[in-house]
């Protein structure tokens, strides 16, 4: 029979083992996403959910700050010269990719050239003014531009600034999204479509002391209710884009923490005006019909019913009250009679079209409200609900008449309007093209004077609110729910989950 001392020693060993298991589990973090990301390649990706994963997987040359400015990440400094036509970047010393390859000037040149020229790249329009990329030395890269381009800093603070291992890209080609290799805090482990994306802590990350999570999982769960149930049961540690009606339940649960923050993201209705046969309907062919459709909508009612009044009704790409918001074009009040009059003038009193929405309860609720509101003005809106990845794929092909989409927002105004409204915008799914608008946007990109840019963007607002190739509905407030054991999370206006400083303790 074991002695008291032996039993005590055994108990001590068991506690130590259990403690080790608890510590290991405490370093795991499971994040519930509203949608399954698209391809995990910064060159090809376009989804909000994809950017959420990239925040942990792929560091950028430049990052944004909590107040919407810019700060160093893989580049420690940058400097404009030659009247804004040359940008010199100084790179962080000693950074390696997750496969051990050096993240140096040659790697930066490789990535930027790929984003500029690869046929599969969605970043080409963002880097269009870049004529060439020069390797000055292993720690210095110089970008030569065809013209001054103020938005470039913001561009390098997003996907076009994400660096991937050239060795991995050369080996995998356009399939690199199946196993991306970047220079971020977490390395790719595996992905099961519609189920999970697993990452693990990168031991040689340049800022490794800021990372406390060992294993990271992203689980796409479109249903907001199911996502919250999984959080409350402990199967998730955090959920992004919390549904506004669920806030009271989160606040009333001692095991959960509610976090909100400002957001530059917005929802819009993209309308196919010139991309194939699907554009051949009254909404697609007539700006007057689109104007009537907008007047049939009550943005504040949408905000109150779906988002508990937490969002900001908006009709512009910039957030109401921000620097580049145009006060001369306030959010229009709903006017059903005027909408009917415009439809009569257009000769289409009962226009019909299909509105495609993602298969989340919130998106479906918004779609149903829009259907009902527009119906009172004479529109016959048919709702089509599809999985989010299918929606994104169909939209990019022009396989839609009108679709609801989210833009996560960017700190530079050009990156909020041009992707949607410029003739070559990579999110201009409906192939809208107005040469006058393009000229204004081009001029605004060449100026670093805030007052001049403000005047130009005001002119742009006047054009696209007349043509209405898309209808912006509201700007977001970022809403998150976390287990109370998760601490250190700080929300940013771009809505991305940054895990620097985040820790997971024992559950309550």
Image: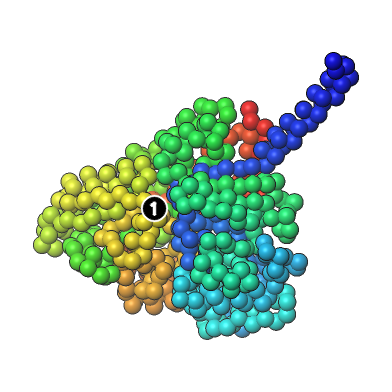
Residue 287 shows in this picture? no
Which residue is pictured at 64% across the width and 31% down the height?
A: 507
Please state, as top left, top right, bottom left or bottom right, where the C terminus lies in the image. top right
Q: Spot the residue most to the front.
A: 1
Name the spot of residue 434 as percent of width and height, x first: 32, 74
Residue 32 coordinates in the image, percent (x, y): 51, 43
- 70 vs 228, left or right, is right
Residue 390 quadrant: bottom left
Residue 468 position, x and y percent, is 29, 63
Colour scheme shown: rainbow
Q: Nearer the viewer, residue 379 or 6?
A: 6
Q: Residue at x 61, y 63 (%)?
A: 181
Question: Residue 92 location in percent, x, y?
Answer: 72, 67
How many numbered discs? 1
Does 378 appear above or below 69?
above
Dot 1: within a 10 Å radius of its alpha carbon, few (fewer than 14), some, or many (20 or more) residues? Answer: many
For residue 418, which quarter of the picture? bottom left
Q: Is residue 147 visible?
A: yes
Q: Judging from the image, what secondary structure is the residue with disc 1 in? A: helix
Q: Identify the residue shown where x is 59% and y is 65%.
A: 162
Image quadrant where one finds the N terminus: top right
Q: Is residue 180 above or below residue 274?
A: above
The residue that disc 1 covers is 388
Which residue is pictured at 44% across the width and 36% down the height? 226
Q: Is residue 345 above or below residue 303?
A: below
């Amino acid at each position: 029979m074991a002695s008291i001392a032996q039993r005590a020693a055994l108990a001590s060993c068991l506690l130590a083992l259990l403690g080790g298991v608890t510590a290991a589990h405490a370093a795991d973090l499971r994040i519930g996403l509203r949608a399954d990301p698209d391809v995990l390649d910064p060159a090809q990706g376009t989804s909000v959910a994809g950017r959420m994963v990239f925040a942990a997987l792929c560091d950028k040359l430049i990052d944004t700050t909590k107040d919407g400015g810019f700060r160093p990440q893989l580049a420690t400094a940058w400097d404009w010269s030659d009247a804004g036509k040359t940008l010199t970047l100084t790179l962080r010393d000693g950074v390696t990719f997750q496969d051990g390859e050096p993240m140096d000037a040659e790697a930066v040149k490789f990535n930027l050239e790929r984003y500029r020229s690869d046929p599969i790249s969605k970043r080409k329009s963002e880097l269009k003014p870049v004529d060439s990329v020069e390797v000055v030395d292993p720690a210095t890269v110089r970008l030569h531009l065809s013209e001054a381009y103020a938005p470039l800093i913001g561009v390098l603070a997003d996907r076009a600034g994400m660096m991937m291992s050239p060795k991995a890209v050369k080996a995998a080609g356009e399939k690199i999204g199946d196993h991306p290799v970047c220079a971020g805090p977490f390395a790719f482990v595996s992905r099961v479509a519609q189920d999970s994306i697993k990452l693990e802590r990168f031991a040689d990350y340049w800022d490794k002391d800021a990372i406390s999570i060992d294993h990271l999982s992203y689980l796409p769960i479109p249903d907001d209710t199911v996502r919250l149930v999984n959080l409350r049961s402990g199967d998730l540690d955090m959920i992004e884009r919390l549904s506004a009606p669920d806030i009271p339940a989160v606040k009333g649960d001692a095991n959960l923490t509610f976090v909100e923050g400002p957001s530059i993201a917005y929802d819009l209705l993209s309308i196919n005006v010139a991309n194939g046969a699907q554009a051949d309907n009254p909404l697609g062919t007539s700006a007057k019909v689109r104007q009537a459709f907008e007047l049939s909508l009550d943005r504040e009612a949408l905000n109150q019913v779906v988002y508990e009044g937490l969002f900001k009704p908006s009709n512009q790409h910039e957030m109401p009250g921000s620097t580049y918001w145009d006060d001369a074009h306030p959010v229009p009040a709903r006017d059903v009679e005027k909408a009917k009059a415009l439809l009569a003038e257009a000769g289409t009193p009962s226009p019909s079209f299909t509105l495609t929405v993602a298969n989340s309860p919130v998106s479906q609720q918004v779609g149903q409200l829009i259907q009902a509101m527009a119906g009172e003005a004479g529109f016959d809106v048919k709702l089509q609900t599809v999985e989010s990845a299918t929606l994104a794929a169909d939209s990019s092909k022009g396989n839609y008449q009108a679709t609801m989409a989210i833009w996560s927002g960017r700190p530079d105004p050009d990156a909020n309007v041009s992707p949607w409204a410029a003739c070559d915008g990579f999110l201009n799914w409906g192939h809208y093209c107005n040469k006058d608008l393009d000229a204004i946007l081009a001029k605004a990109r060449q100026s670093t004077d805030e007052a001049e840019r403000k005047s130009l963007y005001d002119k742009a607002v006047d054009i696209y609110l007349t043509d209405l190739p898309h209808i912006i509905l509201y700007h977001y407030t970022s809403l998150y729910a976390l287990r109370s054991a998760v601490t250190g999370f700080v929300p940013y206006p771009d809505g991305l989950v940054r895990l620097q400083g985040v820790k997971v303790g024992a559950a309550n």
